[in-house]
Image (cartoon, helix red, strand yellow):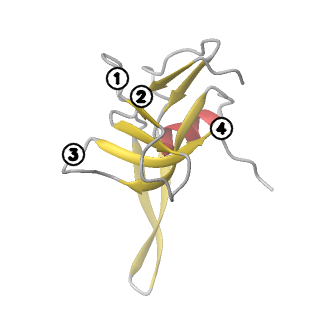
Amino acid sequence: MNISKIVNLTGRTLDLFASAEDAESTLSIQPEPGAPRVVIPTTETAVSEYAGIPLTRERWGKLPAEMPEPQDGVLYVVTQPVAMALWAHGRTDVARPGVPLFRERDGRRDQVGVVGLSLGQDLA
């Protein structure tokens, strides 16, 4: 994939790091101005329990209507549940934040630090 633009639809600033050892982020991606925060509604149903711990099954709602159509060279960064649902429907132009390093910094709850971006999953 030849990426010329990354569009952040997570609703949070993403600070991307090359590795967990890096002290400074390599790239900071602000949420796309005016773009919707893309989410997929989910419901959980208890199916069993173990030692008093509920075991649930999660059901995702419909794919988000506000998700932009694919565009050449554009990679859309979305939350993990959205990415997983879109990957299952064949979208290859979406990524999710990689390994989390922090969820907020300097008291800013709208900022996430991650190592890289995940472009999908391979099943063995």
Q: Residue at 51% of width from left, 57% of height from top?
A: 20
Q: Measured along the vertical axis of the image, is residue 99 above or below residue 37? A: below
Q: Measured along the vertical axis of the image, is residue 53 above or below residue 40? A: below
Lower position in the chain sequence, tag 1 or tag 2:
2
Per the model, the C-alpha gap separating discs 3 and 2 is: 18 Å
Per the model, the C-alpha gap separating discs 1 and 3 is: 20 Å
Q: Pointer 3: what residue? A: 108
Residue 88 location (% of width, % of height): 65, 38
Per the model, the C-alpha gap separating discs 2 and 4 is: 18 Å
Q: Is residue 9 left or right of residue 120?
A: left
Q: Pointer 4: what residue? A: 88
Lower position in the chain sequence, tag 4 or tag 1:
1
Lower position in the chain sequence, tag 4 or tag 3:
4
Q: Pointer 2: what residue? A: 9
Per the model, the C-alpha gap separating discs 4 and 1 is: 21 Å
Q: Is residue 50 left or right of residue 36?
A: right
Lower position in the chain sequence, tag 2 or tag 4:
2
Q: Identify which amino acid the numbered label 4 is placed on.
A: Ala
- Give the quarter of the figure containing the N terminus: top right
Q: Identify which amino acid the numbered label 1 is placed on.
A: Pro
Q: Is residue 18 left or right of residue 35?
A: right
Q: Measured along the vertical axis of the image, is residue 43 above or below residue 33? A: below
In terms of secondary structure, where does tag 3 sit?
A: loop
Lower position in the chain sequence, tag 3 or tag 2:
2
| The quadrant where residue 46 appears | bottom left
- Give the quarter of the figure containing the C terminus: bottom right
Q: Pointer 1: what residue? A: 36
